[in-house]
Amino acid sequence: MDIALDLGTSRFRVGVLGHEQIWSEPATVSVDEQGTCRAGVFAEQLVGRAPRGVSVVHPIDGGVVKEFDAAVQLIRYALSLVEGGKLSRRSNVTVSVPTGLTAVERRAVEEAVRAAGAKQVRLFETVIAAAIGAGLPVAAPRGTLVLNLGAGVTEAAVVSLGGIVDARKAAVGGRNLDRAIAEAVRREYGFLIGIKTAEQLKCAAGASADTKDFEVRGRNLGNGLPESLLVPRALVASQVESYSDAIVSLLVDTLESAPPELVGDFMECGIVVSGAGAQLSGLMERLRRATEMPIQVAEDAENCVIRGLLTSHTRRRNRPVSATESAKRPSPYRRLAAGVQNLLARE
């Protein structure tokens, strides 16, 4: 069985080659004192509500394994979704990883997937998968600029002839924006809210352009009592603006380093945006003004990476084998002849 796995900071997505269904759940793991692990939707419900003796973690942050044991449990749970609850050691898994990971970080991802039950593990660049999933002609001799807005990391890459010409990333994402909003509320009003409340506040501000204030519930740090607070739109907007500035800076740096021949391709076909962050209100218009280039949000932007991984599986399986590759593959007869020669040499 060939499985594709997109390990995100906030959510994981998994699919099987030849099937259209994509499984997506929160990338969250809970562990109790007896060592019992739960992952996905159940663990996410415990964020901020876990009883004593239960810890809730997000083992993947920006494509990097932060908690190895929890990451193994999360991946094992993801694989069990597509294998009908029965884990086997016969699955080949392709995993998306951000650009710029060190050899140690890449090896940690690979080892975590193997420990979860995979037979073979293949690492695939996230931006390439996003471009394929968006339907872009990545194999053509044309330049394509892809901006992938994740929860833990944002990547911008120039893609041509199926490879990366230049790629840059920044440790900013939707999860970072949620933390920034929660910290701004605490700093300005002495009021403590959770990450999930901050995310809801961000979504509410983006969905309603006419609302000036948004009610949230949390704890007053002055008296320690639970209260309600009206948060002005301006506070959320200021944090969104800081997040947008970081994205614009990353995109401009990528454009400045791109070869001149490829810049003309960008101006013609525009910049393609993928990832859940593409839904953030006002961000696309800000990118258009900053770059003076057309910005296109990919269809079903959240699932571009997993669709690209599944497509890359298909292309790799159906790709004809060249004579050079065939010559490199040792046949059983060549191995037998080599073994006989070794025995004769020993005698």
Image (spheres, helix red, strand yellow):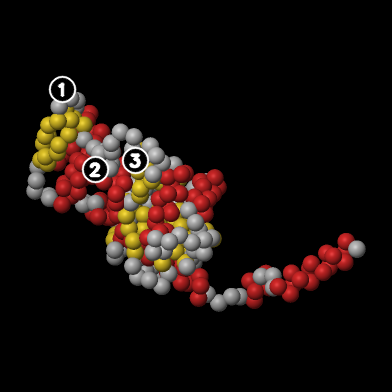
What is the distance, in whole Å, between disc 2 and disc 1 at their CAs?
A: 23 Å
- Please, what is the three-letter code of the amino acid marked with disc 3? Val
N-term-proximal mark, 1 vs 3 = 3
Marks 2 and 3: which is nearer the front?
3
Mark carried by residue 196: 2
In the rendered view, would you say 75 is above or below 47? below
| Identity of the residue drawn at 50% across and 76% down | 318
Q: Are marks 1 and 3 in contact (CB under 8 Å)?
A: no
Judging by the rendered image, the residue that carries numbered circle 3 is 56
Judging by the rendered image, the residue that carries numbered circle 1 is 223
Going by the picture, which residue comes out furthest to the top? Answer: 223
| Identity of the residue drawn at 79% across and 71% down | 337
- Please, what is the three-letter code of the amino acid marked with disc 1? Asn
Indicate the secondary structure of the residue bearing disc 3.
Answer: strand
In the rendered view, would you say 1 is above or below 110? below
| Identity of the residue drawn at 36% across and 54% down | 12
Position in image of residue 259 (x %, y %): 47, 58
- Foreground of the two, 35 or 203: 35
N-term-proximal mark, 2 vs 1 = 2
Marks 1 and 3: which is nearer the front?
3
Indicate the secondary structure of the residue bearing disc 2.
Answer: helix
- Please, what is the three-letter code of the amino acid marked with disc 2? Lys
N-term-proximal mark, 2 vs 3 = 3
